Amino acid sequence: IMDGNGRWARKRGLPKIAGHRAGVKAAEGVIKAAKEAGVRMLTLYTFSTENWKRPEEEVAALFKMLEGYIDKEEPKLHKNNIRFMAIGRIDELPASLKEKIRRVSASTRGHSSLTVSLALNYGGRQEIVDAARHAALEVKAGRLRPDQIDEAVFSGYLYTKGLPDPDLLIRTSGELRISNFLLWQLSYSEIYVTKKFWPEFKKEDLLKALDDYRNRERRFGG
């Protein structure tokens, strides 16, 4: 959960958009560090369904910045064998951004060193509602019986279909909440919180979080 861009900027007397630019740079560094560390799946909470409440000009600037980021990173994704994808209500995003997401997702689908997933227009509750609606339509159409619905079947209707549940959740800025992020998938994930704002989160911080995770004893409720 990449949190604290605005507070990082405010602390330095900078406009909020400067914090978002610094956040993009931090994401670039973390993606590189994750690949080097052998991480196979990295999901970045980029834009939540609640973020639409922000000022219109801030939202527009964020989307423009994201488009530029995707254009800039596409050659690096191919060079480093990194798969790109996005989860969330993608159809509600601006048309130009949707087109870039779909193009790069398709062109990198065969890459296998690391999968980077951006959670865009994403909300955990909304994801579960969308999955329930999808399952209900399948039942109505006669393609699924209610008694066939278990955790595995339901997971197949989530945005993250085919992806593993997270082993580790990292939250920056010291906030002790998960902010409607991957509610279903985080059931047994380990949680690591750092007080650093996201623009301050570097390679050494990621490695520290991974080292902490290695010392956890995971029991999955057993």
Image: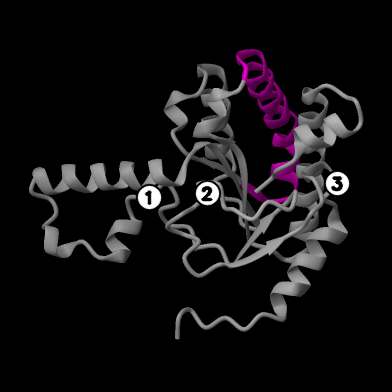
Image: 197 above or below 58:
below
Give x and y (percent) for residue 190.
60, 69
Q: How crowded is mark 1: few (under 14 residues within 10 Å), some or many (20 or more)?
A: many
Q: How crowded is mark 2: few (under 14 residues within 10 Å), some or many (20 or more)?
A: some
In the image, 8: left or right of 116? Answer: right
Q: Which colour scheme is used?
A: one colour
Q: Give the mark nearer the N terminus: 1 vs 2.
A: 1
In the image, 220: left or right of 209? Answer: left
Question: Looking at the rendering, in which quadrant would you find the C terminus?
Answer: bottom left
Which residue lies at the image location 31% right of the left edge and 46% below the top edge? 131
Main SS category, magenta section: helix
Q: Which amino acid does label 1 sit on?
A: Leu
Image quarter of residue 145: bottom left
Residue designated by label 1: 158
Residue 200: assigned label? 3
Residue designated by label 2: 181
Residue 46: assigned label? none
Give x and y (percent) for residue 72.
75, 30
Q: Which amino acid does label 3 sit on?
A: Glu
Residue sitting nearer the eye, 47 or 178: 178
Q: Give the mark nearer the N terminus: 3 vs 1.
A: 1
Residue sitting nearer the eye, 192 or 159: 192
Which residue lies at the image location 47% right of the left edge and 65% below the top edge? 187
- Residue segment shown in magenta: 55-83
Q: Nearer the viewer, mark 1 or mark 2?
A: 2
Q: Which amino acid does label 2 sit on?
A: Phe
Residue sitting nearer the eye, 186 or 142: 186
